[in-house]
Image: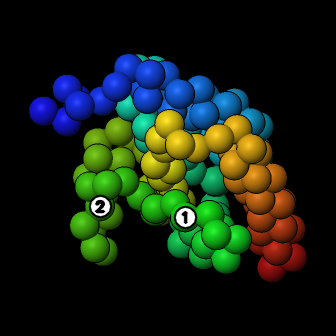
Amino acid sequence: KACELIDYKDAVEASEIKNYLLSNLIKINGTVYNGKTGDSPFILNISFGDIRSEVMLNALSNEGIYVSSGSACASGHHGSHVLSAMNVPKPDSAIRFSLSRYNTLEEADIVIDKLIEYSMHMIICFKQR
């Protein structure tokens, strides 16, 4: 039923934002796309190497950027059976972006800039340990 309510134009617009985010975020060292061609245009799930999702989630939320950790099917401390089934190597570093036709390329650019900034900062911090 939910799929019947989705307007094709909404999916196209969300897909454009998703592809834009992915093509830029995948350039960050250690970034892995946790998806496949043809998956939902409204969801982008990526991992940032050794950076735990909670760390990135908190850093982004301080900037007013709200994402989720893991997958929609995660349950408490047991993690996500979906990410496990997808053989995601580090599911504890996965973050999920939920997109809609209301998101803009300008918002995507802000997210990209912040993720580049935070990932570079966190990589430097990890190397100093």
Label 1 secondary element: loop
Q: Which mark is residue 74?
A: 2
Q: Which mark is residue 20?
A: none
- Residue furthest left in the image: 1
Residue kind at label 1, given as amino acid type:
Tyr
Q: Of residues 2 and 21, which is closer to you in this image?
A: 2
| Residue 19, horizontal then vertical, whole percent | 61, 28
State the residue position of label 1.
66
Residue 13 falls left or right of residue 64? left
Taking the image as drawn, is residue 9 in sight? yes
**Upstream in the sequence, badge 2 or badge 1?**
1
Taking the image as drawn, is residue 52 in sight? no
At 29% from the left and 42% from the top, the residue drawn is 85
Q: CA distance from mark 2 to mark 1?
A: 17 Å
- Number of marks in the rendered image: 2
Q: Of residues 32 and 3, which is closer to you in this image?
A: 3
